[in-house]
Amino acid sequence: MSLPGHKFRLLQLLDGRDPTFQMSDYAIRDVSKYIALSYVWGSSEFSEKAIINGCRLPITHGLYNALSNIWSHIGKTECLLWIDAVCINQMNRSERNAQVHLMKAIFEQSAAVYGWLGLLTQDTKLAFGKLEEVGKLIWCVTIIARQKDGLDAIARKGRLQTSSLRFQGELGSKTARAGAAIAELCAREWWLRVWIVQEGTCLTETVLFCGENATSIRNFMGYERASRVLPSLRSSWDTAPLSHMEMRERRQTSSLSLLFVLDEFRFREATDPRDRVYAALGITTDPIVSHIKPDYNSPVEEVCRDLAKVWMRKAEPGHRLDILGCLDDVTSTTPKVWFPDWRKPLNAVPLYKHSKESITADRLYRAEGGALEEVLFIEIAQRSKAPGLMASRKYFVSQITSTISRPRNTGDPHAPLQDARSAFLHTVTADAKSRIGTYIVDGYHVQFDTRRRNHAIDWHFEDSEDTISSPSDVAMTGSLFGDMKRATHRRRFVWTNNGFMGLVPKDTKVGDRVCILFGGSVLYILSTHPDSDWLDVCIGQCYIHGLMDGEAFEAFGQGGMLR
């Protein structure tokens, strides 16, 4: 029987040889003393069984292992238990749609989340013991010295470097084995799944289990904080746990934009590709998610298209075309459409201010001249051969004439005081720094601001006669190369027919057009669709130096370059 939209099922533990439960329905607002289980489904083979309300229910071997090992811990809490594979009728898509909509509330209202990493190995106990040790030390420092200042103080006085001898050891020693075991825990599949991010990053206390060993996720976070000061610990971390920890911290301190979370989920694993979209809805606080309803009856392409339609109709003015910065790779067999396929790799890092902290970040570029009131679209074409965006206002400002690897001996035609070298350096960073943060150099925290325009290049130290760079110069150099890597990743350097240099998506061809689309703050590369003369293919965002702040729009008003 399907559940009403405001209800969910919970399990009460009973004595029995196999996992045995009494299952009942509850209104989600009326109960909070329950544990939500977070685990990897693993194999789809139902080789084990549980007893539910006196009936046998086939379950996977992975779930059986999880229940067998955490059974005693659950019994001590006298809490009810929520398990998605058992408490949701997975064969009923209507119920599945409704319960997915409640998933965020289910985990956030639970008394605790139990994360099952898998069975233990020989050195799992050593790993959990070391995590407890490091976690307690770092969290004591954090509480006493107010987070970053505490780590900074320890780093400056050299205390953490000295204590690092307790975290490292000779080959074969217990400390070395513990470090290797922590690395193995961080490589487990639990960290990679899209639903795990929502489940393991909520504000509820999260306890991680490996076999019968348990530790708070806070100890993993403490170990990650220590690794910020001790680079030797960084090698223990895989990319997925780092992203997981950052996401958890961001959810506790700030908001997360929907597009940022969706881009993060491209690299996560999902049994059903639609989960890459629906799992993101419970993480972001973006108000636009209220217009997106999970529907597992819809094909994946339709889910992606409908999300784009909602975004371009409901997002804040000035951000409605931000989603075009999330387009995936172009392939020779699949013509480009105007909405991202979240199953595929990102084409290039978005040029707009892709902020984790802000749902509607400040606009970094204003290529359209700020004429947001002129937005006259939006309609998604429904033609099977050429799906895309029908924009009623678009202006072509230039055309790609060549792709080269170094600048010509000429300056920017709209900035005659800049020489070619300066214009080139601004172009290869897209004239924007990427973030605000702190570099740690020789134990010192060096603050830098990377969310500004026209300050991307500062070469004062390049011509300096000093043989020793200051910590700030070292940080600036690192920031510069990071900005270059971010801007040029999967992009090409080009010249346009009217003499501008720029960065364009790697799939851009000679003859493609540089275009202003009202509703977007950057410029776009458009190409003619192979199956339709009247529909354009959006290749992606581009940076054309000298045209990113409304110059082309102003030229149009003066009878200039636009057509």
Image (cartoon, helix red, strand yellow):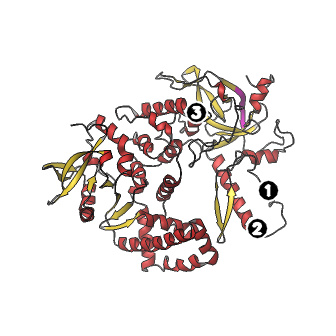
Above or below, 533 against 302 in this view is: above
Tell me the SS state at disc 2: loop
Residues tagged 1 and 2 counted as in contact (Cβ below 8 A): no
Above or below, 423 against 441 in this view is: above
* Residue 314 placement (x, y as % from top left): 53, 31
Nearer-N-terminus badge (1/2): 1
Above or below, 328 against 268 in this view is: above
* Residue 473 placement (x, y as % from top left): 74, 63
Query: Is any atom of residue 337 visible in this view?
Result: no
Q: Quadrant of the C terminus?
A: top right
- Give the left or right position of residue 347, taking residue 557 as reference: left
Residue type beneath disc 1: Trp
* Residue 309 placement (x, y as % from top left): 50, 29
* Total labels drawn: 3
- In magenta, the rendered stretch is 396-402
Can you name the residue that lies furthest to the front here?
30
Q: Quadrant of the N terminus?
A: top left
- Are there few (<14), some (14-19), or many (20+) residues within 10 Å of tag 2? some
Mostly what secondary structure, the magenta segment? strand
- Are there few (<14), some (14-19), or many (20+) residues within 10 Å of tag 3? many
Tell me the SS state at disc 3: loop
Q: CA distance from mark 1 to mark 2?
A: 13 Å
Which label number is shown at residue 260? none
Which residue does the numbered mark 2 point to in the structure image? 469
* Residue 476 placement (x, y as % from top left): 72, 59
Seen from the viewer's position, the closer of residues 327 and 35 is 35
Can you name the residue that lies furthest to the top here?
534
- Are there few (<14), some (14-19), or many (20+) residues within 10 Å of tag 1? few
**Residue located at (75% from left, 50% from top):** 455
